[in-house]
């Protein structure tokens, strides 16, 4: 990895203590991780983009070094990101989300587009599309774990089996060889063991009990938007991309064949190139 050194900070936002990693200087880029990750899932972007941008990757509510305190509804999770930006003196940012971070990024694009320079999402469909298509049999089968996560305590116990080693092995198997180094796995294991994955699992529980609010009609996202999709995603079907242009005024879709759900870690050079192009085009 190249680029500026990664620094770490902590701020009080929206009634929680939030940890973040940051690198570089320039226009701000805010990177939102998914489940079961942390700021570290953006390590290649923190170093790879920091020669031109101020890149910031928080541990989101309930993860790693950030406090695990309810509520976990998507309105609160959006407010966390906006409060982080306010605390760091950021008026507008390039917002990038992956997986659950992509949900929050999409919602910010719909509800708070005035705070975004551009929007980028990796392997997470527009929430309005997912809401309509999640009930299709094939996608229901892919999303079986969402139902499992509604159970009390059992999901936390299952994921922590063998000190989270089984979870780590699953991520390794889903990606091309060499995606994760031994040090990468040690970092993820340390984060999972630090306070467990109950916070992240609660995002799923709250999403079922208090689903994301999507207005009708669905607001058109007007900021330039990039959707990057690793086509070997085991959790989200590639057909979920179709129809996104109905909800986005300026959309660019980039499909990455042979790449899994963990796209920004498995294909960091390609993802960084696409983000750079998108940020530069959006700035105009």
Image: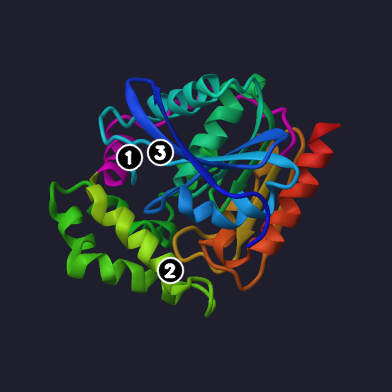
Task: Tell me the colour scheme of the image.
Answer: rainbow
Label 1 to label 2, Cα distance in Å? 27 Å
Residue under label 3, please give it: 60
Residue under label 1, please give it: 203
**Regarding mark 3 in the picture, which secondary structure is present there?**
loop
Would residue 141 be visible to someone looking at this image? no
> Image check: 87 left or right of 147?
right
Above or below: residue 190 compared with residue 22: below
Towards the viewer: 176 or 91: 91
Assess whether residue 201 is covered by the magenta stretch: yes
Residue 133, position in %: x, y? Answer: 48, 48
Above or below: residue 175 compared with residue 32: below
Towards the viewer: 141 or 251: 251
Quadrant of the snapshot with the N terminus: bottom right
Residue 21, position in %: x, y? Answer: 50, 42
- The mark closer to the camera, 1 or 2, is 2
**Regarding mark 2 in the picture, which secondary structure is present there?**
helix
| Numbered range of the magenta stretch | 199-225
Residue at 49%, 55% (x, y): give it. 41
Q: Which mark is residue 183?
A: 2
Residue 141, position in %: x, y? Answer: 36, 62
> Image check: 272 left or right of 212?
right
């Amino acid at each position: 990895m190249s680029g500026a050194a990664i620094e770490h900070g902590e701020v009080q936002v929206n009634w929680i203590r939030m940890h973040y990693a940051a690198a570089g200087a320039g226009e701000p880029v805010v990177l939102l991780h998914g489940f079961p990750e942390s700021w570290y899932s953006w390590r290649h972007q923190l170093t790879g983009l920091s020669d031109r941008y101020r890149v910031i990757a928080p541990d989101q509510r309930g993860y790693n070094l950030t406090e695990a305190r309810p509520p976990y509804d998507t309105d609160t999770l959006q407010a966390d990101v906006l409060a982080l930006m306010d605390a760091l003196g950021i008026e507008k940012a390039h917002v990038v989300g992956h997986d659950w971070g992509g949900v929050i990024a999409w919602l910010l694009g719909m509800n708070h587009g005035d705070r975004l320079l551009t929007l980028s999402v990796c392997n997470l469909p527009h929430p309005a599309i997912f809401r309509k298509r999640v009930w299709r049999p094939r996608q229901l089968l892919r999303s079986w774990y969402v139902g499992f996560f509604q159970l009390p305590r059992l999901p936390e116990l299952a994921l922590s089996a063998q000190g989270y080693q089984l979870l780590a092995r699953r991520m390794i198997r889903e990606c091309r060889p060499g995606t994760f180094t031994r040090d990468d796995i040690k970092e993820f294991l340390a984060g999972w063991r630090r306070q467990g994955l109950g916070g992240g699992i609660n995002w799923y529980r709250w999403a079922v009990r208090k689903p994301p609010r999507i207005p009708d009609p669905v607001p058109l996202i007007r900021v330039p938007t990039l959707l990057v999709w690793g086509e070997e995603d085991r959790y989200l079907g590639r057909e979920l991309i179709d129809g996104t242009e109905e909800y986005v005024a300026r959309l660019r879709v980039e499909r990455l064949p042979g790449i899994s759900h963990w796209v920004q870690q498995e294909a960091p050079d390609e993802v960084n190139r696409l983000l750079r192009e998108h940020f530069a085009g959006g700035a105009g």
